[in-house]
């Protein structure tokens, strides 16, 4: 399982899984876009490079997801997949995100912002897990 | 359900509960809700959030939660808090991501019977003219200078560019522009997110509804508000779009960097605040006010599109006058009597509507004698309300009233539980025509996913923080 949605009254909350930190970041991005529609159906038409430095893993995850919302708002970018994602120990992330114009798909709802509410990234037996609440 | 709050919650009087000051709390928490709504409120984290807010520096009197309260980030939704302008603080989390999310109501010269047969045509025309849904943008292209004007001067820009009338400005909270705005404090990222979104409805719980006045509860005030039974009105519920969301995020991060020692001590990071006397507090106030101005311009440009749509369907004689426009996610400087002295406070309303009573100088002259119109939107397909402000709210809630129904079920859960065909059919049986950008949006916003707005309004009326004037029933809904 890449991610699952958790109970939350007003917004969207998810737990994402991965064998390492890179995979958790990747699956968090997919979880966030699946709030709007099915990323599996999105064609890999355009690519955008992402490179961010932050002060810890939580802030880095926040910034990474926020960058994707920025692309959604300014370029209508809807995610299909993430390539070559690498999170380094100095809290930097490099990735190539691949997707298409959201107006070509049936989607619903909105993503307003990432929040720190209940956010966690932790090491578990099988790798890593993250919890994120997104303001919708 | 028994919760940990049962022992702490004290019923002060009918529809008013209190959690007494203890531990780190600077003031008590006061909840204005009926027994039935209170049961719902204590099931999530909102009361804990109310307590957390009561611990913040320079908070006055009480941490307030209204009848539509539910869990938010840091601060609960349906929450009000007022802080000292020198020793207190300003918190982006006390406003929320959707700065100046709010409601406006347009009053038409049409009656229910004039429009019944044309409801599909008008909703479909609105759907074509008002961009909506995630990823939508308007055809208004703003230069850097234009955007500065929007951010600094709000509806003044709209008036100069023929999207607004003079009367529109007179009948908008703050006359449609906050003097505390400072566009230079808005980041390039926020500007980029907002640039193509002026005049767009957005998605999620935002909507545009054609409604009629179903019942009048106060004839005298209704007359002054120009509302009569069976009259057609149009309600717009949206905010400052990506621009406002980005400003909130930007400043939460700035506070985290600059006041990390304060933020690390907080029970929730989203409670992050800037001390009132810091430069960052002033900068946030400038940026947030700019987003508020953008929000008013957004609802105004949409109003322009609505007027054009109605003219197309009903001819040039049709009129849509603004009754009022109120923000329900905002922080501002307001004056209150504290220990007999006029004192300026930073009042934060997160999912709460300003509700000034009779005589307040900030109310448009035409309404001043009776009080401010309070607009309470329902959920899709249910009733919405017009209330009037009271003196009581001035003393009890820093002049605030509930802002809407408030969710009680996640979108995900609603999606599983409801079926879009059935929701559409049920709405049509009640003579409500709906047009949405997606079918899933219909189930997610299904009336069953929200609290009962009538119950919320009854509770506010009973406590006296907003008195009922008119109930509005939808005829047609447009969802993002």
Image: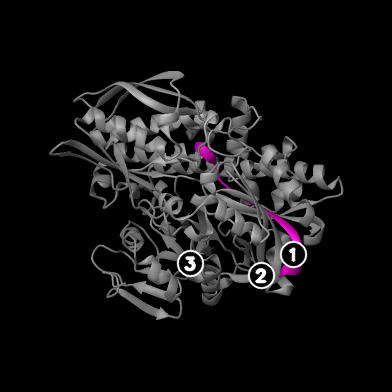
Q: Looking at the picture, does residue B479 appear above or below residue A37?
A: below
Q: Residues within 10 Å of mark 2 (few under 14, many from 20)?
A: many
- Residue sitting farthest toward the left: A125
Among numbered discs 2 and 3, the one appearing first in the sequence: 3
Q: Are marks 2 and 1 in contact (CB under 8 Å)?
A: yes
Quarter of the rendering containing residue B110: bottom right
Q: For residue B440, say whether it is visible.
A: yes
Q: Which x, y percent locates residue B399?
A: 53, 64
Q: Secondary structure at mark 3?
A: loop
What subunit carries mark 2?
Answer: B
**Both on one chain, marks 2 and 1?**
yes
Quadrant where the image shows the C terminus of chain B: top right
Q: Nearer the viewer, residue A44 or A120?
A: A44
Identify the mark at residue B397; answer none if there is no mark. 3
What subunit carries mark 1?
Answer: B
Alpha carbons under labels 2 and 3: distance apart:
20 Å
Identify the mark at residue B469; answer none if there is no mark. 2
Q: Which tag is nearer the camera, tag 1 or tag 3?
A: 1
Among numbered discs 2 and 1, the one appearing first in the sequence: 1
Q: Which residues are magenta?
A: B222-242
Q: Which x, y percent locates residue B146?
A: 63, 29
Q: Secondary structure at mark 2?
A: strand
């Amino acid at each position: 399982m890449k991610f699952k949605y958790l109970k939350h009254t007003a917004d969207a909350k998810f737990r994402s899984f991965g064998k390492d930190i890179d995979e958790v970041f990747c699956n968090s991005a997919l979880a966030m876009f699946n709030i709007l529609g099915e990323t599996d159906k999105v064609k890999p038409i355009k690519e955008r490079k992402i490179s961010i430095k932050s002060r810890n893993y939580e802030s880095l995850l926040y910034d990474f997801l926020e960058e994707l919302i920025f692309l959604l708002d300014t370029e209508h970018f809807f995610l299909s997949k993430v390539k070559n994602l690498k999170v380094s120990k100095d809290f930097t992330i490099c990735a190539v995100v691949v997707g298409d114009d959201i107006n070509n798909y049936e989607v619903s709802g909105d993503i307003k912002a990432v929040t720190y509410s209940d956010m966690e990234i932790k090491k578990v037996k099988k790798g890593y897990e993250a919890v994120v609440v997104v303001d919708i | 359900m028994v919760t940990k709050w049962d022992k702490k919650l004290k019923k002060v009087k009918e529809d008013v509960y209190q959690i007494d000051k203890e531990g780190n709390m600077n003031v008590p928490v006061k909840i204005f809700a009926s027994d039935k709504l209170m049961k719902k409120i204590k099931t999530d984290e909102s009361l804990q959030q109310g307590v957390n807010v009561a611990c913040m520096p320079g908070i006055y009197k009480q941490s307030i939660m209204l009848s539509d309260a539910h869990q938010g980030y840091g601060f609960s939704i349906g929450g009000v808090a007022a802080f000292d302008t020198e020793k207190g603080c300003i918190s982006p989390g006390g406003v929320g991501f959707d700065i100046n999310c709010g409601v406006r109501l347009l009053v038409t010269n049409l009656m229910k019977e004039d429009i019944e047969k044309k409801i599909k045509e008008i909703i479909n025309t609105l759907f074509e003219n008002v961009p909506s849904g995630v990823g939508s943008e308007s055809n208004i292209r703003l230069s850097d200078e234009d955007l500065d004007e929007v951010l600094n001067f709000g509806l003044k820009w709209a008036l100069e560019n023929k999207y607004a009338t003079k009367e529109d400005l007179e009948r908008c909270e703050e006359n449609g522009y906050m003097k505390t705005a400072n566009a230079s404090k808005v980041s390039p990222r926020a500007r980029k997110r907002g640039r193509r979104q002026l005049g767009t409805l957005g998605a999620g719980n935002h909507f545009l509804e054609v409604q009629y006045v179903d019942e009048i509860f106060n004839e005298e005030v209704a007359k002054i508000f120009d509302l009569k039974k069976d009259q057609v009105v149009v309600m717009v519920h949206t905010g400052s779009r990506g621009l406002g969301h980005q400003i909130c995020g930007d400043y939460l991060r700035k506070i985290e960097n600059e006041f990390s020692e304060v933020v690390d001590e907080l029970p929730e990071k989203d409670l992050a605040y800037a001390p009132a006397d810091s430069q960052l507090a002033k900068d946030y106030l400038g940026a947030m006010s700019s987003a508020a101005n953008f929000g008013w311009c957004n609802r105004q440009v949409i109003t322009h599109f609505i007027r054009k749509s109605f003219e197309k369907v009903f001819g040039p004689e049709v009129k849509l006058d603004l009754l009022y426009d109120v923000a329900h996610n905002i922080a501002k400087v307001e004056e209150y009597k504290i220990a007999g002295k006029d004192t300026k406070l930073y009042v934060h309303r997160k999912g709460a509507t300003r509700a000034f009573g009779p005589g307040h100088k900030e109310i448009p002259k035409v309404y001043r004698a009776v009080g401010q119109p309070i607009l309470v939107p329902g959920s899709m397909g249910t009733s919405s309300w017009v209330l009037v402000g009271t003196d009581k709210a001035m003393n009890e809630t820093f002049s605030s009233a509930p802002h809407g129904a408030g969710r009680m079920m996640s979108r995900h859960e609603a999606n599983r539980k409801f079926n879009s065909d059935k929701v559409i059919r049920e709405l049509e049986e009640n003579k409500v025509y709906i047009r949405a950008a997606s079918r899933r949006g219909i189930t997610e916003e299904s009336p069953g996913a929200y609290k009962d707005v009538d119950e919320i309004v009854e509770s506010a009326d009973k406590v006296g923080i907003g008195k009922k004037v008119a109930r509005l029933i939808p005829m047609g809904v447009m969802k993002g």
